[in-house]
Amino acid sequence: MNPWKQTFLSAITLLLISSPVFAGGAYLTEIGSPQSVGTAGVANVTNNNGADAAFTNPAGMTGLTEPQLLLGSQLLIPTVRFDSDVATAGGSDGGNSGSVAAIPSLFAVAPLNEDWRLGFGLSVPTGGGVDYGRDFVGRYQAYKSELAVMSISPSVAYRINEQLSLGAGVSFLYSDMDLRIAVKQPGPFSSDGQAEMSELDDWGYQGFVGVTYKATEQLTFGAVYRSEADVELEGDIKFNNITTPPLNLLTSQFNKAQVDFTYPQMLRVGLKYKLSEDTLLLADVDWEDWSAFGDTRIGFNGTGTAIQSFDRDWDDTWHIGFAAAHRLAEGHTITGGVSYDSSPVSDSKRTADLPADEQVRLSAAYAREFTDKLWGALGGTFLWLGDGKMDQVAQGERFKGEFSTNHILFLSASLKYVF
């Protein structure tokens, strides 16, 4: 391969394999319901009284005896500020690189008979991004990287007996990415060029199965497994301000890009214990196969096609969480929770486009029964995203530092209606 071509393809590989998400184990546990947001996601796997069970654990739908609709909305307010120690290319630290986002959700469950349930979920299981600005100290690795993922999830559940229920479903995942990187050009007076990848999108699917087991009147166990989901994103690639003749000639040959990667499989188990008539205790643990995400294939289409493979050297992650729910009075309930997710990547491998690290969640919510048919809830989660230390060399320029502030505030409101 032409040396200029090889150098350039290597320089933009890190950007093209981006799948920016706000997580250590990168699946979001907050899906817009009071149980999910108010317990740091710990209640998800043993949920048997909310329509969001259609997505979080379909076996729990057998606990609903009447049709139910749950509408939720979340406001995500990130504060993500990088602080550099070394920046050989100069530039800025990017300020607050997070963007405020609103995320809706909808869930419905319909009993077919005493034992069968049908469910439907519309949610955002993962997504997010960073926008450091074009003058970012790590711009030659990435200065903007965004991912939006929407999940449409039909599901079904069957109650085998009073203790045991099974459920299964499939999530149809629509992924859309927007990726930007600065291109370093030779010469002391040369300005940066830009590579912009837009409308990189694809549909994929992810199967999931769940089980709930009521061991005693007080104790319930739950488990859910989600399979891998392969993604083959395709979209436009455009280059701006490329003035150096060899690079100008090379970039003019490319107009399409393809990025292939895998959303990993995961297994989550949990329990719910009825401490008293007014108090529930909850706990969960999980494993997520994020090492599979690291293997990625890159394609460039134009007058020719170049294929590269890349391994981010990510590790599998684990999660643990604890939560409680307490009824203050008839029709008034509060919840709270805390959870921890390990980092999928070591400090030496972390990159600017996807600065994933360990994370800690602190959550609380308040729910009120307005009538015997209508419930409303408000909740919030503070998600700390770790230090995100980085020490990278991109296109011959080194940048090093960590995030001095790195967190997201989730604010949630929801309505539940029982028909």
Image (tube, helix red, strand yellow):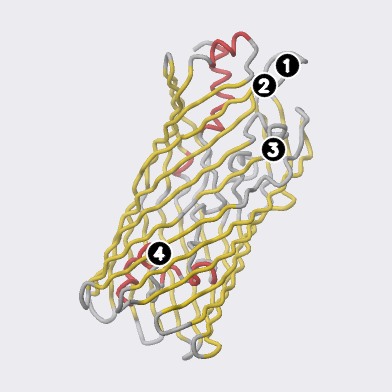
Badge 3 vs badge 4, beta-carbon distance below 8 Å:
no
Q: Is residue 360 left or right of residue 113?
A: right
Q: Quadrant of residue 246?
A: top right
The label nearer to you, 3 versus 4, is 4
Which badge, 3 or 4, is on the more N-terminal residue?
4
Q: Kindly identify which numbered label has been placed on residue 391.
A: 3
Q: Which residue is mark 1?
A: 190
The label nearer to you, 3 versus 1, is 1
What amino acid does circle 3 point to? Asp
Q: Which residue is mark 4?
A: 56
**Separation of disc 4 and disc 1 at Cα?**
52 Å
Q: Secondary structure at mark 2?
A: loop
Callout 4 crowding tier (Cα within 10 Å): few <14, some 14–19, many ≥20: many
Callout 3 crowding tier (Cα within 10 Å): few <14, some 14–19, many ≥20: many
Badge 4 vs badge 2, beta-carbon distance below 8 Å:
no
**Separation of disc 3 and disc 2 at Cα?**
19 Å
Q: Position of residue 147 (x, y in %)?
A: 51, 43
The label nearer to you, 3 versus 2, is 2
Q: Say which of 126 and 338 sits in front.
A: 126
What amino acid does circle 4 point to? Thr
Which badge, 3 or 2, is on the more N-terminal residue?
2
Q: Secondary structure at mark 3?
A: strand
107 in relation to 373, above or below: above
